[in-house]
Amino acid sequence: MTFIHKYPKAAKVAKANFIVAFIALAIGGLFGFVQALHRTNVFRGFFNSGEYYTLLTGHGVLLALIFTTFFIAGLFVWGVTRSLDREPENLTFTWSWFWLMTIGLVMATIAILGGLVPDSSIRAAVLYTFYPPLQAHPMFYIGLALVVVGSWMAGADWFWSYRKWRAENPNERIPILAFMTLFTMLMWYVCTIGLALEVVGLLIPWSLGWVTEIEPLLPRTLFWFFGHAVVYFWLLPAYYVWYAILPKLSGGRLFSDSMTRIVFIIFLLLSTPVGYHHQYADAGISVGFKFYAMATTLLILLPSLITLFTVVASMEHGARQRGGKGYLKWIGKLPWDSPAFVGCALAGIMFAAGGFSGMINASMNINVLIHNTIWVPGHFHLTVGTAVALTFMAITYWLLPQLTGRKLKYKTLALIQPYAWFLGMTLMSNAMHRAGLAGVPRRTAEPEYSGFDFEPIFGTMTEMKWQIAIGGTILMISLILFLWVVVASWLAGEKSDKPVDDYIPEPLSGVEHTPAILDNMKLWFGLALLLVVLAYAFPLWEMVADGIFSPGALPRPS
Amino acid sequence: MSEEKSDNSTKKLVKILVIVGIGVPVLVELMTLFNLINVQIFEDEKDANSQGFDVEDVRGFGEGDTLFSDQASVVVIDELRIKVSAQEWRFALGLTSADSSSQDELEISVDSLSLQSKKMLSGDNNSWEVKQSAPAQVYGEWILPNGDIPTKLFISSDQKTGKDSTKKVSQEVPLDKVPVRYNQNQ
């Protein structure tokens, strides 16, 4: 018996979410590949540079917002159902959030792809960071609003299950999978307040022509209220996999239940007040507030370092169970022939590298060196593009058999896939970081200035361009391998009652050692709101005093 | 027996994958680290930056440069860019007489454009739009094949040689990187 046999309704919902996620992954990934070839001038036959923003928007929105959100929804449906041992409370409600998100996704995608149709008035070449002055068709904003509302309902669905479970188990501690889901969603509720205010209060009225002028600083600020925390909305489900499943894939057990809960609580508290670190170069925000954002951003390294310790300790425990010895020799005993393990482990290594470049981004003074250069996409291709995406792909190899009742096909291809992703991403991201240090801008199909040649610290620009193109091509091959394995296994995998070993062992230091206060959701949610108010109330008040609602007005005399 | 064989081939595959999939990335990152440290500590920054050629010496014409500088009527390039929309890819050229008091019309024609793709585009099917008369200022646009960029202009000007006589002077104008600007409203 596996998940689909015990919880057929939840399995259907999770699978529906995964289908949408993988379609978005395929289209968004293709757009990324085409951009890599175009921007590096290796092959420019797919589109002209005027359509670059359309493809860039498609790449960002489909991968960073749609693939992630739908995959996370599928993963959380699996985790909540399994850990609380109950199917969704009301399937009409469950399917209604899924379809609401899907309708929103279709609307946003039509608006984006409209940019490729000559003379189309439906366009949304506004990038994933969709704030003014770039303006999209209202369909884009309304579609994204529906996706967010759907995700709120999905969270409510999981809280509903939790309440029912709690009524039946008043003295039990929250199971770890459900705990991680609920705290991720609490963080999502906090950070999407900014997005809701921006989209519903400003962008939709502006795109419909009801409001003719908007001061860009306010929507930018509201976007980044959400825009950095959303990174943790992607990342926490990857942590969820690393904490709950990776130790088992390593052959061991989670090192500490309480460490896991503490990490998720810190992310709930600190994810949102850090948004200003994306606005270091923005005029109109006092430097003191930016400094506050820098401090909280650097503080958020703490849960990542705790994660590094806990996950590596869990893996070491697994390797030692498999006969590993010595200080480092045990690494060789890890299951490097298991695609699910390899993908998660390599994603974790890549996340450490992304953390280093993230420290540069977060530091106010050295951020100036790389601000708006291709360094920044180089950084987030390590974090969301690998730590998150590769973890999601890898864990699919373990989850899919549970959701379909079919064994994985083409295991050799599945094994090659994460290694190929790691290789391709290293090549691409390494060159992007180096080009960023030379000042090469991001977000343009024509990254050259008139009368000026970039001077890389070492190497040549041509070599970096080729490194990006080759890396992007390897990534595309890896993506095709993943999709091939998934489709083949889903449709033609061998049916089995036990297609995969889905048992998850108890942590080494279990919930009995975890202080009860860590489960107090009201306390941590209240503190998170308080920190957000402290971070945003004063700067927003300053903006209002400066005349943010009177676009074009002179600034307040200081 | 066949299970053992399969185990061996998996082990071999894993070895290759670890060497290529992890070894190469580690090598790339180590080389990057080595080069960064090498440049910062062991190479004088000036030396590092002075490698290669002097950009100024080889750069082509761009905005602000003068054409026909050895002739009587000197012309300044005040706009040189590619305007791009989802539908079109246009080369835009704006010229101004360097003599701010001159009332004379600019008698200039673009004979042809040499493109990055090695194609030649005839320039004669274009008419200038007169922007202003003193100093004389003209502006023209040419539709290009999508994604192609002009590298050289062949341009002619009617230059006065006496009171009533003129002669046609041609100039080959190698272009610097032409800035590409996205035009959302087109």
Image: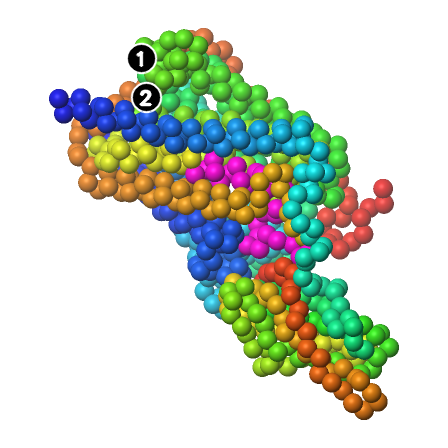
* Quadrant including the N terminus of chain A: top left
Report x, y in % for residue A207: 58, 58
Q: What is the three-letter code of the residue carrying label 1?
A: Arg
Colour style of the rendered protein structure: rainbow
Q: Give the range drawn in magenta.
A: A424-451
Estimate the spatial distance between the alpha carbons at disc 2 and disc 1, rounded to whole Å: 9 Å
**Residue A25 visible:** no
Q: Does the magenta stretch include residue A426?
A: yes
In which quadrant of the rendered view does residue A222 lie?
top right
Q: What element carries label 2?
A: loop
Which chain is mark 1 on?
Answer: A
* Residue at the image point whose x is 53% and y is 43% from the top: A464
Residue matched to label 1? A322
Q: Which residue lies furthest to the bottom in this view?
A: B164
Residue A550 placed where, x, y %? 74, 53
Left or right side of B62 for A478: left
